[in-house]
């Protein structure tokens, strides 16, 4: 009996999850930067952390596509 190895959708799913996280973190960066510019509140740290999370999640999304190819 022949056994067939099916392809996993793990790469697509992980890329979708990490891509969603990257988009949400980019929105956090945008909103906190706007709040800092308009309101004068000290939101630069939040904007920087949002940018770091967005870049990390984007990199993990690309890596997931390559690892689970």
Image (cartoon, helix red, strand yellow):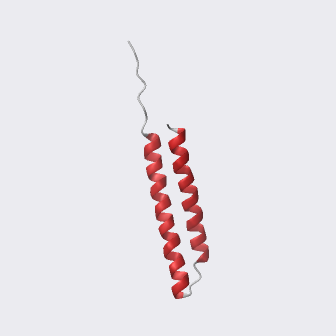
Could you tell me which quadrant the N terminus lies in?
top left
Residue name at image x 56 percent, y 87 percent: 40
Please identify the residue farthest to the left as the structure is shown: 1
Residue name at image x 43 percent, y 25 percent: 5
Please identify the residue farthest to the top as the structure is shown: 1
Above or below, 54 against 32 in this view is: above
Could you say which quadrant of the image residue 50 lies in?
bottom right
Residue name at image x 47 percent, y 42 percent: 11
Residue name at image x 54 percent, y 55 percent: 57
Could you say which quadrant of the image residue 48 lies in?
bottom right
In percent of width and height, residue 58 lies at 53, 55
Above or below, 19 against 7 in this view is: below
In percent of width and height, residue 34 lies at 51, 79
Above or below, 19 against 33 in this view is: above
Number of numbered callouts drawn:
0
In percent of width and height, residue 42 lies at 59, 82
């Amino acid at each position: 009996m022949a056994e067939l190895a099916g392809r996993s959708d793990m790469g697509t799913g992980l890329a979708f999850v990490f891509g969603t996280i990257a988009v949400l973190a980019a929105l956090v960066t945008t909103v906190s930067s706007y709040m800092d510019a308009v309101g004068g509140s000290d939101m630069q740290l939040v904007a920087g952390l949002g940018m770091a999370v967005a870049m990390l999640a984007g990199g993990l999304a690309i890596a997931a596509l390559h690892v689970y190819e």
